[in-house]
Amino acid sequence: MLQELYQEVIIDHGKSPRNSGVLEKATHEAEGYNPYCGDEVHLTVVVKDGVIVDLKFEGQGCAISQASASMMTEAVKGKNVEEAKAIFKRFHDALMSREDPDYDALDELASLTGVKDYPSRIKCATLAWHCLEDALEGQDA
Amino acid sequence: MIADQFPALNQKVNNRELVYLDSAATTQRPKRVIEAINRFYQQEGANVHRGAHELSRRATDLFEDSRKVLAESINAESREFVFTKGCSEAINLAAYSWGLANLNSGDRVLVSTMEHHSNLVPWQLVAEHAGASVEPIPVTDDVLLDLDALEAQLKKGAKLVAVKHVCNVSGTVNPIKEICLLAHEHDAVVVVDGAQSLAHCAVDVKDLDADFYALAGHKAYGPMGIGGLYVRWSILKDMKPWQGGGGMIRKVSFDGTTFAEPPERFEAGTPNVGGAVGFAEAVRFIQDLGIETIAQEERVLNKFAESELSALGIETIGGDPNKAGILSYNVDAIHPHDFGTICDQFGVAIRAGHHCCMPLMKRLGLAASARASLGVYNSKHDIIVMIEAIKEARKIFG
Ligand SMILES: Cc1ncc(COP(=O)(O)O)c(C=O)c1O
């Protein structure tokens, strides 16, 4: 059970996060905070012609929240905004539904679907994604 | 086995025997407390002070007998003991009744850095109203209150000192008697957050010389939704109501309303009679075991837990040699929420987070910690299962 939740790739992303830091020339940014457990994500994004050309995150919190943020940056970089939203929807649905998720479609994000069995941790896995939504909804900086 | 008296402890969680190490959040309740509450609803279940009938009379007697048991257990008079819904509400009562009337622009309120948000935020809210300031009393790296700093702060003039008796993060037992002596020398009143006290140490408000002392039933083997505030009579008798409604008045008219004497003056609306009965029964449960015996056994178990943790290279927060059985720690760089999830898989219930003490966590340079807190039902076996979970966490996070 626990090995399914804490797969090696999650531990790896948690320990060496990808795209970590702050983009000076961000066009969009947002803060995500979960007051219940204190997880924090600060996201800076550069969107050009509807495409997420770059994004970085800074944060602190549990392995799930930080690995999820790291994986998210890899999953959406180079994608257009609509594609990014579609990926989040696929990921979100996979966490919420009772059915087995389509692991292939989820790619690396599939490793996070173990949180399905730990309802109190789902918010940790979706924090960065909600933060991305907030950032993209904001005005161009 | 004391644990056998607690029905909720007798269950499996994730296919393991439940190990309950979250008593600082809320203690579980022995059967006799649950039965006392049940009995009230099955045999009386009537409102107090109002009906001219037998059941109401009995309910009133039970409510007032409970008040007497609780007041006497902390060496207070019944008229000095106001029922509230918990410790937070007790402190809010002190803040909104006494604080609003007595704090003025430019006054200083001293709040210890280790306070629970419950003994900080009400003072911030009221101080803002009054134009008063709220200042932290420093704590040492070992989470001991810095009494020299407090004395210096008092010398500059302060109206009020807010401090907890037993710390829900570090287990520190603050020297309340000494703090009250210091504060009174400088004409400040002392509001003690006693949320954690009843389950861990003897409380004698007269000996401590506290002005306000706040209690929570659910952290002392009693039910949720009931607590109390002790206020020294000479202060309480002049305090203005903070909530209006039934039960707290003498005469009501559109030309003006007069109020009941304390404690009723502060108990608007139908009180939690079942809760009061359960709270009193919980205090009797503690008295039957003997608080000195409880404290002694807890210290032994706490020492055992600390040495087991220390053998794994894990230090607990706080260095009070007489600390209560509350163990906060971090396992390497593993986030406490991840560790909490792993514990849960072993059936071990711990708390993870800032424990409603964000200023203390910041002072210690921590975002969060895991916390295991002991109750009368815990044994060495429980600690050993927790140690098993720590080893598994290290395996996973390697
Ligand atoms: C030290 C301390 N103060 C206050 C509180 C709040 O008590 P209650 O939840 O009964 O309002 C708690 C418990 O959460 C506590 O540990």
Image (cartoon, coloured by chain):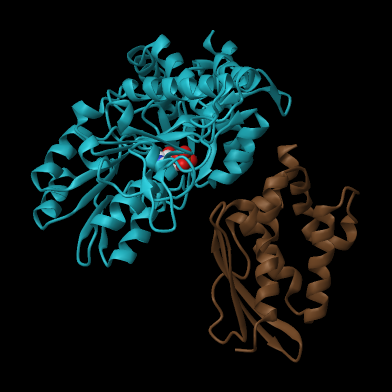
Chain colours: A brown, B cyan
Taking the image as drawn, is residue B221 in sight? no
Q: Which one is nearer the viewer's eye here, A127 or B396?
A: A127
Marks counted in the figure total 0
Q: Is residue A77 above or below residue B137?
A: below
- Residue, far top: B1
- Residue, far bottom: A49
Taking the image as drawn, is residue B81 in sight? yes
User: What residue appears at the point 59 percent right and 24 percent down from the top-left corner?
Assistant: B19
Q: Is residue B107 above or below residue B189?
A: below
User: What residue appears at the point 47 percent right and 25 percent down from the top-left corner?
Assistant: B63
Point out the image quarter for the N terminus of chain A. top right
Residue B159's spot in the image, x, y percent? 19, 53
In the picture, measured across the screen, residue A57 lies left or right of residue B178, that is right
In the picture, measured across the screen, residue A52 lies left or right of residue B378, that is right
User: What residue appears at the point 67 percent right and 32 percent down from the top-left corner?
Assistant: B345
Residue B47's spot in the image, x, y percent? 56, 30
Q: Is residue B171 above or below residue A110?
A: above
Q: Which one is nearer the viewer's eye here, B209 or B326?
A: B209
Q: Quadrant of residue B82?
A: top left
Q: Which one is nearer the viewer's eye here, B271 or B23?
A: B271
Q: Ligand 1 falls in which quarter?
A: top left
User: What residue appears at the point 63 percent right and 37 percent down from the top-left corner?
Assistant: B342
Q: Which one is nearer the viewer's eye here, B355 or B70?
A: B70
In the picture, measured across the screen, residue B139 lies left or right of residue B263, that is left
Residue B237's spot in the image, x, y percent? 26, 40
Point out the image quarter for the C terminus of chain A. bottom right
Q: Quadrant of residue B194?
A: top left
In the picture, measured across the screen, residue B102 lies left or right of residue B348, that is left
Residue B129's spot in the image, x, y percent? 33, 65
